[in-house]
Image: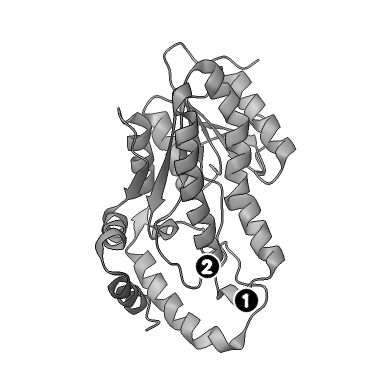
């Protein structure tokens, strides 16, 4: 039988913890003294991966989410921190994705966050507090050409998180968004392109892809983002947004203060689509 976390030890539940930002976050939290349970879609029964207890959870399934949260709660005794990380991207022009492809993306990236959060909130309300960190993106604040639906899902995370934070504060629960920029993970390599290719976009997308790859080559690592997650988890006063890394902070600042026309010109030049 699983043992409950010692009194006073913080606990964390991290979705999408088998690789990338989720794995790095789980390891960083564990290293900081949290008792962590991570999830993946294909975790084996009783699996321990890199010292992290892993359980099965498919965030597109209400049943899977409910079972995973119940198991994590039974093993941890409480859930002080939820890190909603599971997600993926679709690349290509917006016209190149079918509505079915878009629906599947939102089912994971947005509704997956909703499912897990709704399963955890009753636990946090009962225990009198908790923190929810949703992994968003800088493209939740800015346009994301050739990634319109990933961008839209991250815009949805921004609005949802800010609204939810106001609703749950009276229960001692706070919500924040972690906003990475270009991060060296496998998300791009493992993500599909639009399922309805349109030849008219091919040349522009090729230029964009080259510029994007160059940005990724000098981007932050998953460990860099994990450090931001840990800082938010341990902050005395939680802020709503945590841009992760210098480029993310600069982009967030530019979006707020540059005139729209100038910002658009800079973005189009950066991604070689001017």
Q: Between residues 149 and 9, which one lies in front from this camera angle?
A: 149
At x 30% / y 52%, what residue is drawn? 245
Give the crowd class for mark 2: few <14, some 14-19, many >=20 residues within 10 Å: many
Which residue was labeled with disc 2?
Answer: 148
Quadrant where the N terminus lies?
Answer: top right
**Relative to 16, residue 188 above or below:** below
Q: Residue furthest top?
A: 7
Quadrant for the C terminus, please.
bottom left
Q: Is residue 57 visible?
A: yes
Q: Earlier in the sequence, mark 1 or mark 2?
A: 1
Q: Is residue 187 above or below residue 198?
A: above
Q: Is 159 situated left or right of 260 in this image?
A: right
For residue 264, above or below residue 86: below
| Label placed on residue 157 | none
175, 74: nearer the viewer: 175
**In this rendering, would 236 be left or right of 111?**
left
- Label 1, label 2: how far apart the Cα atoms are: 10 Å
Task: Classify mark 2: helix, strand or loop.
Answer: helix
* Color theme of the render: one colour
Residue behind mark 1: 96
Please identify the residue farthest to the right as the structure is shown: 63
Where is residue 148? Give x, y as percent: 52, 67
Looking at the image, which residue is at 58% across and 63% down? 191
Residue 18: x percent and y percent?
55, 44
In front of the other: 92 or 224: 92
Q: Quadrant of residue 103?
A: bottom right
Question: Residue 10: percent from the left, percent from the top?
Answer: 43, 21
Q: Residue at x 71, y 64 (%)?
A: 100
Residue 23 visible to an observer of this rendering: no
Report if the CB atoms under discs 1 and 2 are less than 8 Å apart: no
Which element carries disc 1, helix, strand or loop? helix
Percent x, y of residue 91: 55, 69
């Amino acid at each position: 039988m699983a043992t409950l976390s010692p009194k006073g030890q913080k606990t964390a539940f991290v979705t999408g913890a088998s690789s990338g930002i989720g794995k790095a976050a789980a390891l960083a939290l564990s290293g900081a003294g949290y008792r962590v349970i991570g999830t993946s879609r294909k975790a084996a029964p009783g699996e321990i991966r890199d010292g992290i207890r892993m359980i099965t959870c498919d965030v597109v399934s209400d049943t899977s989410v409910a079972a995973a949260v119940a198991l994590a709660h039974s093993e941890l005794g409480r859930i002080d921190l939820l890190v909603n990380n599971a997600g993926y991207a679709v690349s290509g022009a917006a016209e190149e994705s079918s509505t079915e492809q878009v629906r599947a993306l939102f089912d994971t990236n947005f509704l997956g966050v909703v499912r897990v959060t709704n399963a955890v909130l009753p636990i946090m309300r009962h225990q009198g507090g908790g923190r929810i960190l949703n992994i968003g993106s800088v493209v939740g604040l800015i346009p994301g050409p050739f990634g319109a639906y990933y961008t839209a899902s991250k815009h949805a995370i921004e609005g949802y998180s800010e609204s939810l934070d106001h609703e749950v504060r009276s229960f001692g629960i706070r919500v924040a968004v972690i906003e990475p920029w270009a991060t060296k993970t496998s998300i791009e390599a493992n993500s599909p392109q639009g399922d309805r290719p349109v030849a008219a976009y091919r040349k522009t997308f090729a230029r964009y892809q080259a510029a994007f790859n160059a940005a990724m080559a000098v981007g932050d690592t998953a460990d860099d983002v994990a450090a931001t997650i840990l800082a938010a988890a341990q902050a005395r006063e939680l802020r709503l947004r945590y841009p992760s890394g210098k480029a993310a902070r600069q982009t967030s600042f530019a979006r707020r203060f540059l005139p729209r026309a100038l910002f658009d010109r800079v973005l189009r030049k950066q991604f070689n689509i001017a």
